[in-house]
Amino acid sequence: MRRWRLWFLLGVGGFGLVMAIIFGRERSVEELIAQLQAPSAHDRADAVRRLGGMGAKAAPAAPALIGRLNDEGTVLIRTKMAWEKEWRDVPYSVGSLARDSLTMIGKPAVPALIEALRSGDAKVRREVVSALGGISQEPDVRQRFGDSPEKWAEWWKRSEGKSEKK
């Protein structure tokens, strides 16, 4: 009887370990880029958020994230602001999450973002300008440069020169 209990506990514990390895492991950038094509908005949003959480390591995903800027799929994210008493579910589009992830990737995403300003889609250009403004952290830069790829490219050259001098 005792042997049966031991094997049962080892079996259950082993199953839990296997599940933790399968579902808890960090996924590669390539796997997450592939997940951006999932039919489910929840799965796409999960990939977008994980890529943003990787920061600069997710730079190869910038073009794929830019491709999701006009994704209207909606997910609910549980949030609570410091002044609020209760948690609440807030709807976010996959596109707005992609914009935020591009901002979190930061400067490695800038060349792809500047190229995306040549898009014929006004919404994509608007989201790109928002991401570039978040990366630049300069006051009123969005208003000064608008969606002009030339002005943003000039800013990028100046910005890169500053970082090389440091």
Image (tube, rainbow, N blue to C red):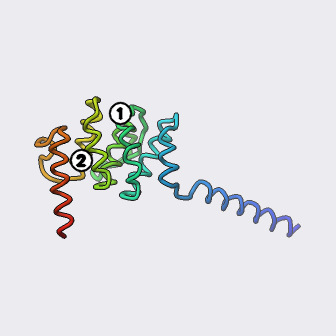
The image position of residue 156, as x and y in percent, is 20, 52
Q: Quadrant of residue 92?
A: top left
Tell me if I can see residue 91 in this picture: no
Judge from the rendering whether residue 119 lies leftward or rightward of residue 73; answer left or right: left
Which of the marked residues, 2 or 1, is nearer the chain's N terminus?
1
Closest to the observer: 3 or 29? Answer: 29
Q: Secondary structure at mark 2?
A: helix
Q: Quarter of the image containing the C terminus?
A: bottom left
Tell me if I can see residue 29 in this picture: yes
The residue that label 1 is drawn on is: 70
* Three-letter amino acid code of the residue under disc 1: Asn
The residue that label 2 is drawn on is: 132
Q: Residue at x 79, y 62 (%)?
A: 8
The image position of residue 164, as x and y in percent, is 21, 66
Circle 2 residues within 10 Å: few <14, some 14–19, many ≥20: many
Q: Residue at x 38, y 53 (%)?
A: 59
Q: Quarter of the image containing the N terminus?
A: bottom right
The image position of residue 155, as x and y in percent, is 16, 51
Judge from the rendering whether residue 134 lies leftward or rightward of residue 9; answer left or right: left
* Three-letter amino acid code of the residue under disc 2: Leu
Q: Quadrant of residue 24?
A: bottom right
